[in-house]
């Protein structure tokens, strides 16, 4: 199998991700979940993904669909379409699976996958993290990693617009 095929095989539907999560559970793999728009990958994203990968055996990344990003961020977003954003994340060796979701929050996906760890960046508090209550009820843990100041997609877009 060629590398591009391996990368594409890491992009799963929610149902395929659920079945893969069950396989990982049978192998006693600790599943970590994080999510976001990941519109323009930057240092802050890499820091969060790195912390997430270190927090377990398997990293699943939920990615907002284009329609979801538009609802959350405005009509000018996303800059990169969902297929590219998923492919970009799947190409990272620290990411084991990427799942697109249509809703504005990943709650349905979190309930489907039942991760052992739910991880978000330091710009959130535990009461703001969608799915935290469900993960804790299932015996999992919620981690908040330090926010990397000065890095955001919005800031990058503004910087580009000023060029």
Image: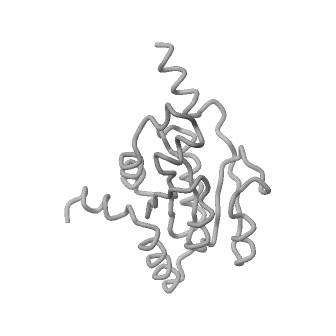
- Quick one: 163 or 2, which is closer to the camera? 163
Question: In the picture, residue 141 is in which quadrant?
Answer: bottom right
Identify the residue at horizontal 50%, vertical 53% (top origin): 63
Residue 53 pos. (x, y %): 54, 60
Residue 35 pos. (x, y %): 56, 54
Identify the residue at horizontal 77%, vertical 56% (top origin): 126
Q: Is residue 18 above or below residue 122?
A: below
Residue 152 pos. (x, y %): 58, 34
User: Could you tell me which quadrant the N terminus lies in?
Assistant: bottom left
In the current view of this chain or complex, which residue is farthest to the top?
Answer: 163
In the current view of this chain or complex, which residue is farthest to the bottom?
Answer: 26
Q: In the visual, does 123 lie left or right of 69?
A: right
- Quick one: 45 or 22, which is closer to the camera? 22
Identify the residue at horizontal 49%, vertical 46% (top origin): 67
Q: How is the image coloured?
A: one colour
Give the tally of numbered discs.
Answer: 0
Q: In the visual, does 90 lie left or right of 149?
A: left
Q: Is residue 116 above or below residue 131?
A: below
- Quick one: 45 or 107, which is closer to the camera? 107
Q: In the visual, does 84 lie left or right of 32?
A: left
Identify the residue at horizontal 52%, vertical 70% (top origin): 57
- Quick one: 19 or 88, which is closer to the camera? 19
Q: Is residue 93 above or below residue 157?
A: below
């Amino acid at each position: 199998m060629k590398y591009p095929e391996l990368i594409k095989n890491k992009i799963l539907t929610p149902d395929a991700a659920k079945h893969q999560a069950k396989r990982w559970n049978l192998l006693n793999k600790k599943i970590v979940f994080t999510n976001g728009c990941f519109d323009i990958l930057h240092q802050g994203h890499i820091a969060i993904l790195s912390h997430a990968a270190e927090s377990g055996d398997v990293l699943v990344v939920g990615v907002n669909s284009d329609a979801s990003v538009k609802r959350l961020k405005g009509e000018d977003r996303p800059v990169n379409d969902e297929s590219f954003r998923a492919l970009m994340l799947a190409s990272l060796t620290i990411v084991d699976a990427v799942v697109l979701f249509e809703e504005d929050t990943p709650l349905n996906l979190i309930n489907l996958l039942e991760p052992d760890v739910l991880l978000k960046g330091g710009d959130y508090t535990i009461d703001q993290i969608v799915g935290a209550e469900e993960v804790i009820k299932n015996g999992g843990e919620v981690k908040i990693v330090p926010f990397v100041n000065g890095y955001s997609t919005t800031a990058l877009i503004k910087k580009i617009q000023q060029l």
